[in-house]
Amino acid sequence: MATMPCGTFVPYCGLQSLTPGMYSTTSSNWLSSQCCASNGLLASSCSTIFSPDCSHTFLSSRQHKDSYDFKRSHPHLIVRAGKNYYSVLGVAEDARKPEIKTAYKRLARTYHPDVNKDPGAEQRFKEISNAYEVLSDEEKRSIYDRYGEDGLKGGPSMGGGFSSIFDELLNNFDGMGMGGNFRNGYSEGEDLAYSLRLDFREAVFGVDKDIEISRLEDCPTCEATGTKPGSKSYICKTCNGNGQLISSIRTPFGIVQQALSCPDCDGMGERSTPCNKCRGDGRMKKPKKITVNVPAGVDTGNKIRFQSEGNSGRKGGPPGDLFVVFEVREDPVLRRDGNNILYTCKVSYLDAIMGTVKKIPTVDGMSDLNIPPGTQPNVTLLMTKKGVPFVNKKSKRGDQLVKVQVEIPKKLNDEERKLIEELINLNKAKVPSS
């Protein structure tokens, strides 16, 4: 059998092979090449802190519910050489994330160095971890599927300015007239949001908070299938067992045939008696307790992401995420401005003239502030490192800015007036006559 270099396109459905990176907008080859482009998704790690201006659109199901791409539905379009990560985990090349995750957990428990003392266990565990790191990340997996290990080390890139357009197009219109990619009931779980209120000083210095959420988990009765145990399936009348409904839609590229998953059978082509416990959804509401490690320095609008702590996916789909959004109560005395603390200190006109030491409230407690002689109204004095710690950098803190407000009395008694007049006359005597 002749061999082909890694990354070569193989003719399929009448489309000719195309050198990676070479596109012609007037040729069907461009469509073939773009259809094979990576459909990578961004995967954030657990407990990631986000700034207040991050999007809050996590209450609904994700836009990218299924991580399928055109290449995944046609795995023989591209030849890959090198070590086979799929074989390392013992899964098929079209395996979905839940299957990959399950295989990894099973192998990791077997070959973990703390459990398995065999000489080759540690090396085997590293191979398993490396394979899972690649195959669990959509972007890395797409690169590996096309170019093998060399692609992950900075090998040739497909490029293509229109890849994102076709990624979205293929996600929405799976068929493209070439045998579509259907969900078969598989869908990712919805993300959840939880609003956590914090006291002012809890947000400044961090705190551990226990919360309880209500989320959808796999139904134990039907094992997340949504089907009543022991029941028999029958052909779906809506799609006549095809699992899909075909329609056409006009796009900037012309008329595109759209193959949609049948809504009545979820693309299965068959229907069955729904589970009595979960009513066919395959999931049930259950409470879940989670400890939130609030880092020092968070502010209102910041949020932490807990990966895979949202609703379970339907029929084996991966779970969604949980976002804990912080709402910080205001302090009655201190005001926050980023990582700085603002405070207004009132002093008498005599203290402003003569200077004094004032007790100032800070997030650390009461601290002394030196008011130098001759302090002018509305001057701002700096108390270094008395502000809010930077998130994930406890050693770095902001400052406390103290605005001095000089109080001038509206009324004077006779003795005070006499003394001030003497002071005025004394000051006039110092001024040389012109």
Image (cartoon, rainbow, N blue to C red):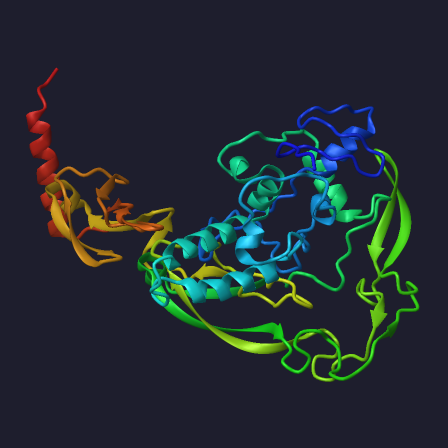
Q: Residue furthest front?
A: 1
Query: Compared to 69, does 284 lie above or below?
Result: below
Location of residue 78 (image quadrant): top right
Image coordinates for residue 141, horizontal then vertical, percent: 58, 46
Q: Quadrant of the N terminus?
A: top right
The residue positioned 65% from the left and 40% from the top of the image is: 38
Which one is nearer the viewer's eye here, 337 or 339?
339
Q: Quadrant of the C terminus?
A: top left
Q: Hey, which quadrant is residue 261 in on the image? A: bottom right
Residue at horizontal 25 percent and vertical 39 percent from the top: 379
Quadrant position of residue 90: bottom right
Along the viewing direction, whichever of 279 and 293 lies nearer the viewer: 279
Q: Nearer the viewer, residue 59 or 126?
A: 126
Q: Position of residue 17 (x, y in %)?
A: 75, 30
Image x and y of residue 219, in percent = 64, 78
Residue 9 seen:
yes
In the picture provided, is 46 more to the left or to the right than 141? Answer: left
For the image, the number of numbered tags is 0
Residue 302 can be seen, yes or no: no
Q: Residue furthest top?
A: 434
Instruction: Tell me: 301 left or right of 182.
Output: left
Q: Relative to 157, does residue 350 appear above or below in the rendering?
A: below
Q: Residue at x 9, y 34 (%)?
A: 425
List x then y, in percent, for residue 244.
86, 58
Horizontally, residue 196 falls left or right of residue 274, namely: left
